[in-house]
Image (cartoon, grey):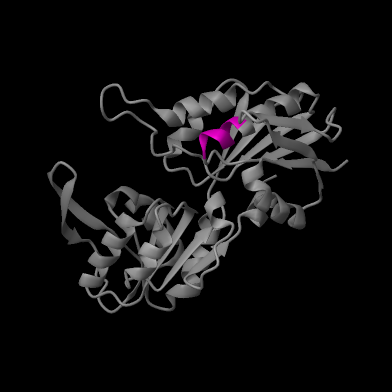
Amino acid sequence: MKKLLFAIKDYEYLAEKVMACGTFEKGQIEVSTFTDGERYQRILSKIENRDIILIGGTVTDQATLELYDLASSLVSYGANSLTLVIPYFGYSTMERAVLSGEIVTAKTRARLISAIPKSNRGNKVVLFDLHSEGIQYYFEHDLYPVHVYCKDLVIKAALKYGGDNFVMASTDAGRAKWVESLANDMGVNAAFILKRRLKGDHTEVSAINADVAGKTVIIYDDMIRSGGSIINAAQTYKNAGAGDIYVITTHGLFINNGIERLKSSGLIKKLISTDSHANMQAIDDDFVEVNSLAELICSVI
């Protein structure tokens, strides 16, 4: 019997792509909103003894609760197994407390997901390019976390645009290890920017660890919010003599006109992102290339 595939509203676009690359049956739900803003959900498909896949990123608090409510009910109605596919795990940058009293929201969200009742054969959560590898260990009880790396997608895009002589680069030393791993796999040099903190949030560039003069530079970051740090990094590499600059990210949020900011900077030739975040579903701009996670999801589930 085919696995039943469900999705929360924000991720119906990705569920359709996954349906096209796998042998699944589409799960049917009814969703509406009461006049007071509360959400109504009803599962229309027969659930008992079925293996269930549920796609939903925690892109907003509302989406997180929709995912939790639906997942809990799928188990309550007799799911044989439950696999949660979370393409983008929100609050992943809040994986630790820096200041006293800060709430580690990545951990509280993981605990919430972990509170979903256990199905007959257990529950699994599939996560993609987490900002911090330790986040997967925040999930508790009998929920089995699987951290999937999107390295093959990143490498494919880098080789497509990098040509014969490019440097794989990061925005700062914080992502240097991951970028170095990508560079080693492709047999190219890795570059990162060394910064010196001056006062408060103010920093200055003290050095770049590799020669980028005359070379294509491909900047990778796991997540881009507004694009400010990407623009600063691109300017630094350009000042050091870089040729064409491309940007690759797994999770493109691009809030506050982030795409337009990157485009209008005049520093970046092309922006490549996956469709892990709901903000990427309706992008129509030649400056942006969107590569779907669908086939990777199919291979995992």
Residue 101 falls left or right of residue 254: left
x, y percent for residue 235: 25, 66
Instruction: Please say if 80 is above or below 18.
Output: above
- Could you tell whether 136 is left or right of 78 in the image? left
The one of 73 and 188 positioned closer to us in this rendering = 73
Q: Residue furthest left?
A: 198
Q: Main secondary structure of the magenta part?
A: helix
Which residue is outermost to the front?
A: 35
In which quadrant of the rendered view does residue 33 lie? top right
- Image-quadrant location for residue 162: bottom left
Looking at the rendering, which quadrant does residue 144 occupy?
Answer: top right
Q: Residue at x 43, y 59 (%)?
A: 182
Tell whether position 62 is magenta.
yes
Q: Is residue 80 left or right of residue 195?
A: right
The residues colored magenta run 60-65
Q: Is residue 299 visible?
A: no
Q: From the viewer's side, name the closer residue of 4 and 278.
A: 278
Q: Position of residue 38 (x, y in %)?
A: 63, 28
| Residue 19 drawn at (x, y percent) | 76, 52
Q: Quadrant of the C terminus?
A: top right
Looking at the rendered image, the quarter that the N terminus falls into is: top right
What percent of the width, then of the height, locates residue 111?
52, 24
Instruction: Identify whether 279 is placed above or below 2.
Output: below
Residue found 42% across the figure and 62% down from its top: 259
Q: Is residue 41 visible?
A: yes
Rendered residue at 70%/51% (across/down):
298
